[in-house]
Amino acid sequence: MNARTRWKLAVPLIGLSLLMIVPAVGGTWVFWSEFGTTYRALSVVICLVLLAQLGLAVSVIRPTGDVPWLRIGLMVVTFLVACGVAAVRRSV
């Protein structure tokens, strides 16, 4: 896979990751004092998972011989984990 293709694949993934991480971190920071300890802890977990997702998106740029399906799959898994933790946080 050449560099141009890696960048064409990575840019939308990075954009989608930023669309999720920016509101998560911003909301956690703004509403920190309004919620209890459990809600705060789950919010921090969500932010860390989404930061890992952003790291995976950026790592797609790294040269490989083939399409980085494992990293893209891990991004999907981190997205699902963040959604699951958000669902648990909502029920708290």
Image (cartoon, rainbow, N blue to C red):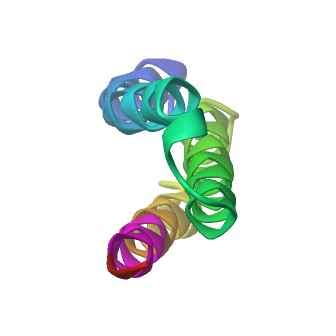
- Left or right of 49 on screen, residue 69: left
**Residue sitting at 42 percent across and 27 percent down?**
18
Q: On screen, 70 above or below 35?
A: below
Q: Position of residue 76 (x, y in %)?
A: 40, 67
- Depth check: give the residue in front, 15 or 6: 15
Name which quarter of the figure residue 7 lies in. Answer: top left
Q: Position of residue 54 (x, y in %)?
A: 57, 38
Q: Main secondary structure of the magenta part?
A: helix
- Left or right of 28 on screen, residue 89: left
Q: On screen, 50 above or below 11?
A: below
- Depth check: give the residue in front, 46 or 70: 46
Q: Position of residue 72 (x, y in %)?
A: 46, 59
Q: On screen, 4 above or below 87?
A: above
**Residue sitting at 48 percent across and 54 percent down?**
67
- Is residue 88 one of those drawn in magenta? yes
Name which quarter of the figure residue 14 lies in. Answer: top left
Q: On screen, 80 above or below 40?
A: below
Q: How many tags in the picture?
A: 0
Q: Position of residue 12 (x, y in %)?
A: 30, 29
**Residue sitting at 37 percent across and 29 percent down?**
23
**Residue sitting at 55 percent across and 62 percent down?**
39
Q: Quadrant of the C terminus?
A: bottom left
- Depth check: give the residue in front, 40 or 57: 40
* Stretch in magenta: 82-90
